[in-house]
Amino acid sequence: MAATKDEFFNPTKLSARDKAAATDHTARSIISAEATQREKKTEKLRQLRLEREAAEPVPAPARAKGRKAPADH
């Protein structure tokens, strides 16, 4: 079977509105996928940070240095 031009190229032209709609749809789907990936990554990193903070011992608060009473002269 010989390959013809009609098999590879759409013989009908798309209107500018159709091209814009297709581009808009594609762009929105890419942006949505990236947002989903970013949210998953953020949640994963948040979970790892919380686990790390839970595993670390809580440092004891430092004692406040008391002021010395002024010496009477």
Image: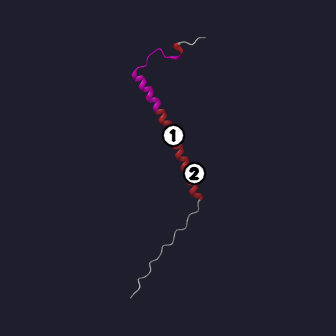
* The stretch drawn in magenta includes residue 21: yes
Measured as percent of width and height from the top left, residue 54 is found at 58, 58
x 54%, y 44%: residue: 41
Q: Name the residue tied to disc 2.
A: 48
SS label for mark 1: helix
Q: Name the residue tied to disc 1.
A: 36
Query: Which amino acid lies under the numbered mark 1 shown in the image of this protein?
Result: Thr
Left or right, 17 with reference to 42: left
Measured as percent of width and height from the top left, residue 18 is found at 42, 23
* Residue 10: mark in rendering: none
x 42%, y 26%: residue: 21
Query: Which amino acid lies under the numbered mark 2 shown in the image of this protein?
Result: Leu
**Quadrant of the frame with the C terminus:** bottom left
Relative vertical location of residue 47 with respect to residue 24 in this rendering, above or below: below
Q: Quadrant of residue 3?
A: top right
Q: Quadrant of residue 16?
A: top left
SS label for mark 2: helix
x 46%, y 32%: residue: 27
* The stretch drawn in magenta includes residue 23: yes
What is the magenta range? 8-27
In 3D space, how far apart are the residues under numbered discs 1 and 2 (Cα atoms)? 18 Å
Residue nearer the viewer, 72 or 39:
72
Relative vertical location of residue 25 with respect to residue 5 in this rendering, above or below: below
